Image (tube, coloured by chain):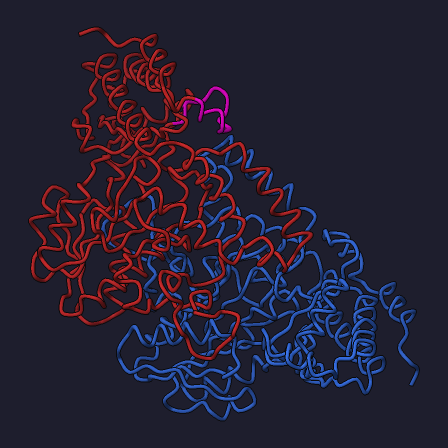
Chain colours: A blue, B red
Amino acid sequence: MNALTRARCAALDAADPLAAMRAQFALPEGVIYLDGNSLGALPKATPARLAELIERHWGRDLITSWNTHDWIRLPQRLGDKIARLIGAGSGAVVVADSTSVNLFKTLAAALRLNPERRVILSERDNFPTDLYIAEGVAGFLEQGHMLRLAEGDDIAGAIDGETAVVMLTHVNYRSGAMHDLGAVTAAAHRAGALMLWDLAHSAGAMPLDLAAADADFAVGCGYKYLNGGPGAPAFLFVAPRHQESFRQPLSGWLGHAEPFAFETSYRPAPGIGRYVSGTPPVLSMAALEVGLDLLLEVPPAALREKSVALTECFIAAVEQEAAGLGLTLLSPRAAERRGSQVSFRHPSGYPVMQALISDGIIGDFRAPDILRFGFAPLYTRFVDAWDAAAALAEVLRTRGWDRPEFHRRATVT
Amino acid sequence: MNALTRARCAALDAADPLAAMRAQFALPEGVIYLDGNSLGALPKATPARLAELIERHWGRDLITSWNTHDWIRLPQRLGDKIARLIGAGSGAVVVADSTSVNLFKTLAAALRLNPERRVILSERDNFPTDLYIAEGVAGFLEQGHMLRLAEGDDIAGAIDGETAVVMLTHVNYRSGAMHDLGAVTAAAHRAGALMLWDLAHSAGAMPLDLAAADADFAVGCGYKYLNGGPGAPAFLFVAPRHQESFRQPLSGWLGHAEPFAFETSYRPAPGIGRYVSGTPPVLSMAALEVGLDLLLEVPPAALREKSVALTECFIAAVEQEAAGLGLTLLSPRAAERRGSQVSFRHPSGYPVMQALISDGIIGDFRAPDILRFGFAPLYTRFVDAWDAAAALAEVLRTRGWDRPEFHRRATVT
């Protein structure tokens, strides 16, 4: 097999159908940014869009903008855009609040729609906010609900007749391991459980098909692969069959059937609208819309094709250039089981990542020993994957990470 | 008594110690904006602050900004600024989520801290989202909690041994009537109830003293008198004595004692920090901070003095210029019972307000017949109050609002 070289990576970039999208992002000079799975990069169109919103819509048109600039429908309008990325129909998604708050709404719905059961089943290594919110819902109800945890590979076998809802993050934030959306949903349904997916680490990095998977609920994050900006509002999907069968308890005025009738009693909006609570953060919503519009320009399948090719390229480059330097691949080797990130373990993971960051290679460290690299397919190049792998090999080879003082530092997070 | 004239209003502006603050706001030409109680005006410093945040902090510094630009402490840092406006100590307020979501957190806490009682007592004409969220909390618990409503003037008498929490908006959104913060809180406490204040229509328009009132909980809005921009994040106050006695159920990862330890189980942050849920919307938070910094430049007492003087001036001007034209003052005549807005009733309220708006006088209509005018003391002039009153009189005098077709239109909202 031919050795991978930087020239071959450059050739892959030259042949990349998404290559032109990189020019739509304002990436800093001298930086290889492999943390778009934590905070997506800035679209070049965002500053002007926000300036217009702030100076003209807010500053000049003031309160009238709720109608003239359609602020009032932002949750639904952006939701419909996200629906196209995740295989949901129009009217099945809203953008609102944070992922955490949306987890509360959907877990509340799931528990009430499966009232005979008491168990929320999740993965021990799920992102913490999912687990914490499940604890919060269960504890608040005081009706014996509980969170039960299984290892990621054992989830399907752990679903049983007590399981009210299975709550999983599709792509694991640490390892990048990806669940089978359709198979796990089917297993949940066979056992009489509902299925709630957290798409934080997959929406915008690959096409998803919630309708084909027959998922019940989903939530996801606006500031990772959707490039909506720091703390961008999150999204929420409810299958149409469930939308009107429950009043979610965060029943704020913008989820009312007629918010501006100012009625004394809550009447939930038809459809997905009742999952909106309070007034949307318009500035943050507008930035998210720019990110969504960029994603909608590209064929969804091309996103996943490039994402797989990038992560394959990075794994191959690291294993070639840094062979024997103490790295262990944590992410699944099989592409179909891996999201858009690659994680390696190394006993000196923390100082190694600090060294990479100081060299302009921005990845993430996750305790106890994980080096995490995200590959956002819209703006990451194959030469970035090569250069990051080469830099990682260089750091490992030249800086003596087997010295004990680095092992001590590795316990600091 | 001397007649009020525009010249006298101009003299009041010349003597106004807050007059210079108006230059800090980007108000549109040809508009008299009396709707700052719905959406506050744009501070001139906001566009540059947001451009810096977006282009340099997000675009260039990317993920490192959570530390280098202290995004991670935005909820607490902005909370401490709001604390100075509402008479709370440092560490008693966070900025997070929407008013609706914060109402859920604080009502949840109040019900669990007063577990023998089942009644949420509120005002029938409270802002709807407060009532809807109370319905949502009570309905979700399925433990017999209920929302009981009384008229505004009868609240103190309606508090009884069943009342777990009294939830009131300090200044009524329709009438501008203001409750006595200290007296109602004391009445609630005498009856063994907790007190939750919604400060949406008072924070930023007058000094408040939650500590002196001994309030238990409060929430409020960032986009009205705080001038934080459309859908700005809201705030939440919890008296220090209650902060650690309850785990609020929206227990997202940023309310954890160590969010970046990524622990499997929720351990609530000490103090007010546990009332943060998910990742804050940084763009919207940054805009709110600009509004807060402007408010912190002025002596709090001056805000209230000017607010009272403005509303007195407007009432006097309307009653002088529009005498006999069918208006009835809805707001309390006694300044100490009135917030920073003035509402009049008129049988043709809807088309009258439409006519005013088309003439550049921006107020609000509230069904069935209410003309609502807000007087944000930071940027509203006495001549604005005069000109609005004169325009209202002119509209009423010359456009034949006693004709039946206008009465029909008045039922359209």
In the foreground, A86 or A335: A335
Residue span colored magenta: B20-33
* Residue B161 found in image quarter: bottom left
Left or right: residue B10 versus residue B118 is right
Q: Position of residue B412 (x, y in %)?
A: 31, 35
Q: Quadrant of the C terminus of chain A?
A: bottom right
The answer to whether A319 is drawn above or below residue A352 in the figure is below
> Along the horizontal axis of the image, is A394 left or right of B260?
right
Residue at image position (28%, 62%) is B136
Query: Height in image: A157 above or below B409?
Result: below
* B330 sits to left or right of B385: left
Quarter occupied by residue B170 = top left
Residue toward you, A25 or B261: B261
Relative horizontal placement of residue A45, taking residue B45 as reference (left or right): right
Place of residue A314 in the rendered image (x, y in percent of width and height, measured from the top left): 78, 75
Q: Residue at x 42, y 55 (%)?
A: B96
